Amino acid sequence: MFIAKLFVCGLFYGECITLADTKGLHRTEQQCEARIREMAGDLKTMFPEVRLKDVGCQRLGHFV
């Protein structure tokens, strides 16, 4: 199982934060990567000034 995570900067006063998917876990890394693309697209639409610094699929029980 995987969880999608985005590391973004500029959302809160220029600070960088990690955003984790709240829709839940994904069975495969490919599903997780698709979710990352969806999340990144939504984020850029809502907050065009945000800089996407890193993305990753964290395997449950492991750190990205």
Image (cartoon, helix red, strand yellow):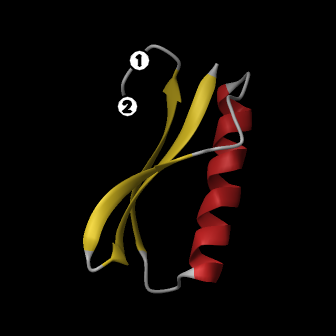
Residue reaching furthest bottom? 49
Q: Give amino acid for label 2.
A: Val
Label 2: which secondary element: loop
Q: Which mark is residue 64?
A: 2
* Circles 1 and 2 in contact, beta carbons < 8 Å: yes
Residue reaching furthest top? 61
Side of 18 relative to 1 (left or right):
left
User: Which quadrant does the C terminus fall into?
Assistant: top left
Residue at left offset 65%, top offset 69%: 41
Side of 33 relative to 15 (left or right):
right
Residue at left offset 28%, top offset 63%: 16
> Which of the 4 image quadrants contains residue 37?
bottom right
Marks 1 and 2, how far apart at CA: 7 Å
Whether residue 31 is situated above or below residue 12 in the rendered picture: above
Q: Which residue is mark 1?
A: 62
Whether residue 43 is situated above or below residue 19 in the rendered picture: below
* Mark 2 crowd level (few <14, some 14–19, many ≥20, 10 Å Cα): few
Residue 48, how many percent across, how many down? Answer: 52, 85
Question: Looking at the image, which is closer to me, 23 or 36?
Answer: 23
